[in-house]
Amino acid sequence: MIPRDPAVEVPLFALALGVGLLALSVLLAWNVRKLQKTAADYYLAGRGVGVLQNASAISGDYISAASFLGISGLTFLLGFDGLYYALGFFLGFALVLFFIAGPLRRFGQYTIPDFVGGRFHTNIGRAVAVLCVLVISLFYTAPQLLGSAKILVILTHLPYPLAVALMAGSITLYVVLGGMRGATMTQVFQFWVLWSAIFIVTLLVWQGGLPYGKVLGEIQRLAGGDEATVAAQGYLGPAGVQHLWKSLSLLLALVCGTAGLPHILVRMYTNPDRRRARWSVMLVLVFIGTFYLMTPFIGFAMHYLFLLTEAGSTSGVATLSTQTMDWLTLDGQNLAVPAAAMHFGGQLALGIAVAGSLGAVLSTTAGLLVVMSGALGHDLYYNLYNPKASQRTRVLVARGSTVIMGVVVLLLGLAVEGMQIAVLVGLAFAVSASTLFPVLVTGLWWRGMTSAGAIAGMFVGLGTSLFMIFGKDLLPLWLRLDNPGGVSVMASFVTIFVVSKTVGVAPDDVDRFMALVHGTSEEQRLRSAGKLKSRKLFIDRPRRR
Amino acid sequence: MSDILRRNIPPSEGRDKYGTWDLSNDQVSPDEDLDDAYEPRSPHDWSEETDRSVRLLMKRQRRLSLTAAGSLFGAVLVAVVASHLFPEIMSVPVWRNFSPALLTIGVIAYPVTWVIALVYVLLANRMDGLR
């Protein structure tokens, strides 16, 4: 993050925007505090979130500090390989749209462990799913809190522990007050703040005389002009075949990991119906797609300016200041966006970039807090301990769970001060890709899946991904991957298939379940009455000879 | 009644303690879209015709999802593999200093995904009988 330097003036505009963003979030949640009358109100905003609102909230939920600061940073450092991160984060939503969004909405419960418990009628499966949700959410929350506290340290020069406490306290407060409804409203607002921030920075860079094509051409020129040299360096072009396996594993982990993130999946329940759930994800693809098109460009542009400044060029393009060069040298992986904002727009643009990154962190952390409180209050308390609890008790327990998880998150935030944001986020993606995603996809589409298969799949996915991350040194070289998704996702799918085929039988109501998640009332009624033969779709039409 | 239908009995009492997908305790607003509010709750709601139509619908949905996912991820896979197998060719600038690798993975993949996703949503909703 930005190194603290007493000589650097505190950007007052950034401070005002940051504090304003936080205050507005609490205010929005305060406004809806009395609407939390049922568990569905608290966890799912009453299942009444519209398409545009949900799409903005999902995008805000999803775009975290890792995306806002990390993608530009990775492109700045790695060049072409950074594009894989952007593409992987983006394509995960296509998988959600094609296989999960519609059926999961029709299943229509509260949490992802509900799916495991309801589909396979197993409390053990529900408990394992709760464990997976908590592991994923905690791995994902820690770096968000780390990022937001560091931003606060820069803006206010507060000590890190106090900054963590302030951030965790504020986010917990507005989630306790507003539940999912409050979180949704703030996420919508925060998403548009962060999207606008990236758009403004991109515009500033472009208008500053550095359109995309020129940046790429100049990087090639500075590298010697020899295209083969650039390709060999692997900055603007892909590395050789030896890196193919690593790239594919990374892409698989990011794509499947996105499709298994509990705070994203739970938002499918908040739409009123399946049609709106699908349109919401479609819009998310547009919103985050435009975001991921812009962020790598900023990274490439900053790389060009960095090379230019190092070379002491006099080409007419303004070189970077000493302060900006220091930021990029010390922590280019996280600071390409703030450095670009500072270079092209001064303190004002830096303030906008800081507000954007704060928005990214706040919205993601709030979503994760709702999911964790659901795992605790809905899955553990209501489903496993007291199924007869009244709606009022459930809302009280939900709020209590949020406070408990807020304290856990606070302690975690204090513990991870020295860790890298990207590493922690990578862990979350690897675990979600290997646990919840395989169970959801197979559970929604394969009748033959058994509860033993689901439980074994989650355990193997969780164990494999954690071992391949923490026990990396014990593995042969070809298995030491930056992200073990390529192996652990496959291991989970294979386990689900093999165990389901050999242990237990599918639940006896599996056909009713499939009718619930895939059938349509009107179509079923018409078909039953013999009034509907078939719908003419391209996949039904006979092939032309 | 076939074996398949015989299995479609209402959930037994014991199932309640493990969790069900009965939403009766959920408050549904009166103006909620009824498209997704149907669930066969008793053997009377379930006929061989219903079973066949649900299976057919599911099969068609699966085909649509696999077609959409196959087209998109197949194209991305080809771009990634080609970029690694032929780095010299894929790194040569072809348009405004963009190489084929940069153009496909950094730019074109996005609008292509939007188009496939849009077609998917329209067809999937139409297939489900939703507006």
Image (cartoon, coloured by chain):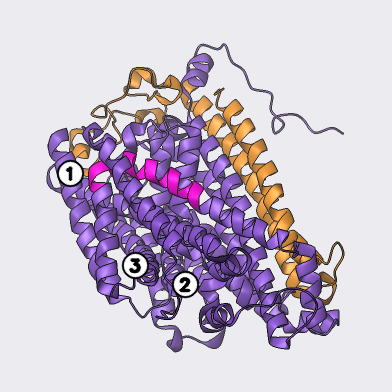
Chain colours: A purple, B orange
Q: Of label 3 and label 2, which has the lower sequence position?
A: 3
User: Visible in this render: residue A331?
Assistant: yes
The residue lying at 85 percent from left, 69 percent from top is B93
Residue type (three-letter) at the residue carrying disc 1 = Tyr
Q: Position of residue A278 (x, y in %)?
A: 53, 37
Q: Of label 1 and label 3, which has the lower sequence position?
A: 3
The residue lying at 44 percent from left, 43 percent from top is A188
Q: Position of residue A14 (x, y in %)?
A: 44, 61
Q: Of label 2 and label 1, which has the lower sequence position?
A: 1
Neighbour class for label 1 at 10 Å: few (<14), some, many (≥20)? many
Discs 1 and 3 lie in a common subunit = yes
Q: Quadrant of the C terminus of chain A?
A: top right
Label 2: state its secondary structure.
helix
Q: Quadrant of the N terminus of chain A?
A: bottom left
Indicate whether residue A188 is drawn in magenta: yes
Q: Is residue B116 left or right of residue A36?
A: right
Q: Which residue is mark 3?
A: A142
Q: Is residue A104 left or right of residue A544?
A: left
Label 1: state its secondary structure.
helix
The subunit letter for the residue under badge 2 reads A
**Residues rendered magenta in the picture:** A175-193
The residue lying at 52 percent from left, 66 percent from top is A69
Q: Position of residue A215 (x, y in %)?
A: 76, 69
Q: Which residue is mark 2?
A: A422
Residue type (three-letter) at the residue carrying disc 3 = Ala
